[in-house]
Amino acid sequence: MTTSDTIPTHALDIEKIRKDFPILQTKVYGKPLVYFDNAATTQKPLPVLKSLEEYYKTYNSNVHRGVHFLSQQATDAYEQARKKVAAYINAAYDHEIIFTKGTTNSINLVASSFGRTFLTSGDEVLISGMEHHSNIVPWQLICEQRNASLKVIPVDDNGELIMDAFEKLLTDKVKIVAVTYVSNTLGTVNPVRDIIGRAHAKNIPVLLDAAQAIQHMPVDVQELDVDFIAFSSHKMYGPTGIGILYGKENWLNEIPPYEGGGDMIKNVTFAKTTYNELPFKFEAGTPDMSGAIALGAAIDYIQQTGINNMQHAEEELIAYAYDKLSAIPSLRFIGNAKHRAGAISFLVGNIHPFDMGEILDKQGIAVRTGHHCTQPLMERFNIPGTVRASFSVYNTREEVDELIKGIAKAKKMLE
Ligand code: PLP
């Protein structure tokens, strides 16, 4: 734990933090931008922007292949970034960190490589009813290929997983459990320790989709004892196009490469190819070097701010927003989980979420509307979509007040 982790929440100077994010000065239709679409992607602080610029200005070069100075500098920085990710999630080994394109890519890798090795006819993959399409479709694809079936842990009216049903679904047929840590639509924080504990009691591995957890709370893979986790840089203040798959060493050794190409090989002949060691076995082709290095800068930024401080500040802001939104007549929340992070979803009277989104947009307020890539969850609640406000460390109470005013305006115009 760093010293900054022990500072109480109020010690975070949000106005100072906001100055690190140049985009927050943007005006939208002449109004100050209020950015509440952080679950889709977060904004980027200056050190991340500077890292990208510095990379291309001073040491752009391909990694792992050159003996020349720049290539070694780029390789060192790229591998240093891997170390930062490993330290951030407390991985036992740096080689358990695989650079991918993002959460979607990471989950496809596991679904394909694990599925080809361990799924056979009649087996089951267990996911939940609140998964993002990224943690549904890759499993459907592999289940179809392997003649296996997809089973789903149901969600209750509060937007929480029904754990009794989970217990019943967790039979010997299940070969892997893949669930989200935090719901991108409802903000529900799932009881992942319990899920992992129960699955491991039956020797079933667990993949966590941590796309909406990694930027809001400390994630310690050894403490969780999780087998695989996936997340995206762009949702944790880093650049787009890069993400992480963490896998326990033994699992990564047991599953085959996902893609073939340069860097992932030890020796190639037309008769047979042998694969490189971890983590390179899973990193075919030229990686997103600048992205990985800038993700390292994003992690430095989070570490300096203190993830515990950020979590407390965000929890306070969400509680404030929840309170204010509750006072709006005809507003109903979609999802009322006891533990939540990041996002609040709601509907107001009969106002269509798109109409609400458009009116808020005209006031400079960016929220997301629609199904949020969770169509089965929308079906569960029998709604076409929601309005989702999602929060980050740089959001303020004043911005929440603007949202409340915006909703009041939309109500006046549309109800
Ligand atoms: N899983 C969850 C819970 C998400 O919220 C998202 C993105 O919104 C994804 C997966 C997919 O992430 P990406 O598009 O960065 O691959």
Image (cartoon, grey):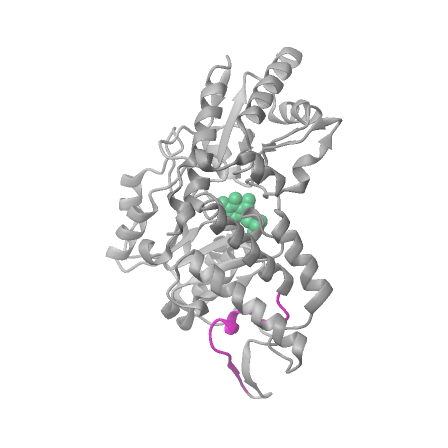
Check if residue 45 falls in the magenta segment: no
Examine the rendering and report whether any part of residue 180 can be seen.
no
Return the residue nearer the eye: 394 or 9.
9
Check if residue 277 falls in the magenta segment: yes
Q: Which residue is rendered at x = 49% and y = 46% of the image?
A: 305
Seen in the picture, residue 385 relative to 82 is either above or below; the reply is above
Seen in the picture, residue 265 relative to 288 is either above or below; the reply is below
Spot occupied by residue 59 in the image (x, y as percentages of width and height):
68, 69
Q: Which residue is rendered at x = 47% and y = 77% of the image?
A: 277
Seen in the picture, residue 109 relative to 163 is either above or below; the reply is below
Spot occupied by residue 192 in the image (x, y as percentages of width and height):
34, 47
Residue ranking furthest to the left: 201
Return the residue nearer the eye: 331 or 370.
331
Examine the rendering and report whether any part of residue 76 can be seen.
yes
Number of marks? 0
Q: Main secondary structure of the magenta part?
A: loop
Q: Which residue is rendered at x = 35% and y = 56% of the image?
A: 226
Q: Which quadrant is the C terminus positioned in? A: top right
In the image, is 368 to the left or to the right of 173?
right
Spot occupied by residue 338 in the image (x, y as percentages of width and height):
35, 31
Residue segment shown in magenta = 272-288
Spot occupied by residue 176 in the image (x, y as percentages of width and height):
37, 57
Return the residue nearer the eye: 136 or 254.
254
Q: Quadrant of residue 355?
A: top right
In the image, is 349 to the left or to the right of 222?
right
Seen in the picture, residue 331 relative to 175 is either above or below; the reply is above
Return the residue nearer the eye: 83 or 383.
83
Q: Which residue is rendered at x = 37% and y = 35% of the image?
A: 339
